[in-house]
Amino acid sequence: AMAVVTHARRIQIRPSCGCLPVPPAWLARQICSPCSGTQPSIVTNTSNDQDTPPQLPNTQQLSDRVVRILGRNPSRFTLTGTNMYLVGTGKRRILIDAGEGKPGVLQDLLEAMQMRGCTELEQIVITHWHHDHVMGIPELLAHFGTVPVRKYLPAGGLGDEVATAYPDGMFDPCEYLRHVPFEGLADGELLHTEGATLRIIFTPGHAADHVCLLLEEEQALFTGDNVLGWGSGTFQDLHLYMTSLRKMRDEQPRMLYPSHGPVVEEARAGMWLQTYIDNRESRIQQVIAELKAGPAGGLSLKDLAQRVYRHEPRVLTNPVLFYGACNNSRLVLDCLKKEGTCVQVGDNYLFRQGRL
């Protein structure tokens, strides 16, 4: 999976590591075994005309009813940082995501609120459980007092996903937020605040509890981590992720407010979503083609990644990028196995004839 960026009449490949559910230090300890197939997802990248996302101010008015507050947590995984959004026009407004609780962020939020006559948070809505979206919750509640904290609560919980993302137990959202009384969100639920109506759209794939929010007054979509404003994101379940991307596209948003990176403006929103879909579908077809052309005994994950990325020497020679190539290939294979178009025999993967 390669990062993409769209311009008026062309599509360019642009590098990005996207947004991982794990801190950078954790990944650094894991890349010694790049093809184990057990680690969280990472996207691979290739060099091009711009290797860093555009810088963003700490706070910015984006529309009459949307203010962005930057989480001050930049990294190769969070781009310029996590975007928090203050939504509405009245004295009480909705905050989307809580960041990591980095120094200065609460003050940025308070100043943004004061400048606009906002005195309270009506509720805090979390797009998904990853640490860069939830670790700021305790600080916000300590300052604002009792504020409803809303999050989608999947029926199966998050145990398996948390264990996969943080196998050493370095972050457990349930433990970290054990004193936070979360209130569940429902798919299709409408959230109202003065000047804004937000519709919840359940969009799993990047995370099991991931939601997007459609701002109905602007036909603008808060995309969470499913779609970024620069480069490409990551996913845990490709089958669910593709379904969610199509669901987001079918809303026909006029503007995208991502959790990482700049706003995707009106002229590019539809193309940006379609490019995300096309690039993933292209990679799926590449994997299928290599499985079909492979030996009768199938291909190992490493062999498959080497074939799929054979025209990208930087990926093949860089251990971190090749780790990403292996992991992305594994996620495609998991999707194909769910669809019945691929079977695994031992360590090898084979195309299942007659299913396509």
Image (cartoon, rainbow, N blue to C red):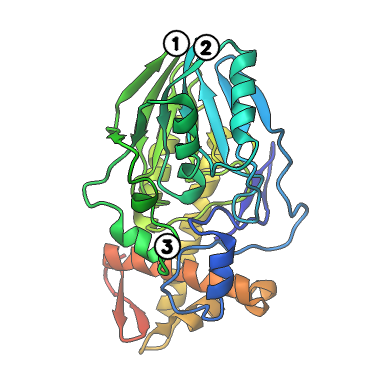
- Circle 3: residue type: Ala
Above or below, 89 relative to 260: above
Q: Point out residue 186 in the picture as x, y percentages from the top left corner.
A: 27, 32
- Circle 2: residue type: Thr
- Marker disc for residue 8: none
Above or below, 254 relative to 209: above
In the image: residue 20, left or right of residue 334: right
State whether residue 265 appears in this view. no
Mark sitting earlier along the chain (1/3): 3
Residue position for label 1: 194
Q: Distance between the Cα atoms at labels 2 and 1?
A: 6 Å
Q: Point out residue 103 in the picture as x, y percentages from the top left corner.
A: 63, 40
Q: Which is nearer the eye, 324 or 307? A: 324
Name the quadrant of the C terminus. Answer: bottom left
Name the quadrant of the N terminus. Answer: bottom right
> For numbered disc 2, what is the local secondary structure?
loop
| Cβ atoms under marks 2 and 3 closer than 8 Å | no
| Cβ atoms under marks 2 and 1 closer than 8 Å | yes
In the image: residue 241, left or right of residue 48: left
| Cβ atoms under marks 1 and 3 closer than 8 Å | no
Residue position for label 3: 165
Badge 2 local density, few (<14 within 10 Å), some, or many (20+)? some
Mark sitting earlier along the chain (2/3): 2
Residue plotted at (57% across, 54% down):
18
Residue position for label 2: 89
> Quadrant location of residue 353?
bottom left
> For numbered disc 1, what is the local secondary structure?
loop
In the image: residue 61, left or right of residue 94: right
